[in-house]
Amino acid sequence: MDDRRIHQAIDQLVEERQALLGLEAAGYATEVDRQRLRELRVSLDQCWDLLRRRRALEEYGMNPDAARVRSPQVVER
């Protein structure tokens, strides 16, 4: 996944997150919505982590495509 596609994924996740936060603020969010918000937070963290690691590899003359998405357990710690 290249940087452009990672940014696109981030944009989509943020858009969905904003919609769910709007439901929550209005008092209409369900438990399913809240669970999805938690999942989105982790997915966003994974995307940003991948993007940072790709940029670091590139900065040091290495192949950014060597970076892979890390597990939620790794990213969240």
Image: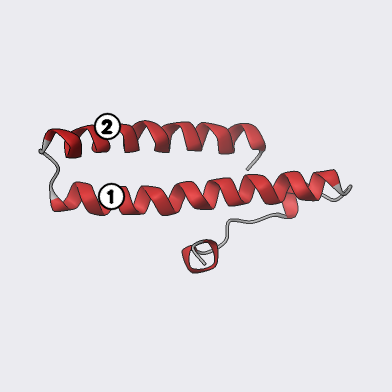
Residue 21 lies, in percent from the top left, at 26, 37
Q: Residue at x 74, y 55 (%)?
A: 66
Q: Is residue 38 above or below residue 8?
A: below
Amino acid type, label 2:
Ala
Instruction: Give the secondary structure at mark 1.
Output: helix
Q: Quadrant of residue 26?
A: top left
In the displayed structure, 23 sits above or below 54; it is above
For label 1, the residue is: 36
Q: Which residue is mark 2?
A: 19
Point out the residue furthest to the front here.
25
Q: Is residue 26 left or right of residue 20?
A: left
**Label 1: few (<14), some (14–19) or many (≥20) C-alpha neighbours in 10 Å:** some
Residue 46, horizontal then vertical, whole percent: 52, 52
Q: Is residue 74 left or right of residue 36?
A: right
Split into 4 quadrants, where in the image is the N terminus?
A: top right
Q: Is residue 20 above or below residue 68?
A: above
Q: Amino acid at mark 1?
A: Arg
Q: Residue furthest right?
A: 61
Snapshot colouring: secondary structure
How many angstroms separate mark 1 from mark 2 (CA)?
11 Å
Residue 47, position in %: x, y?
54, 47
Residue in view at x 32 percent, y 53 percent: 38
- Which quarter of the figure has residue 70? bottom right
Q: Residue at x 40, y 50 (%)?
A: 41
Q: Residues within 10 Å of mark 2 (few under 14, many from 20)?
A: few
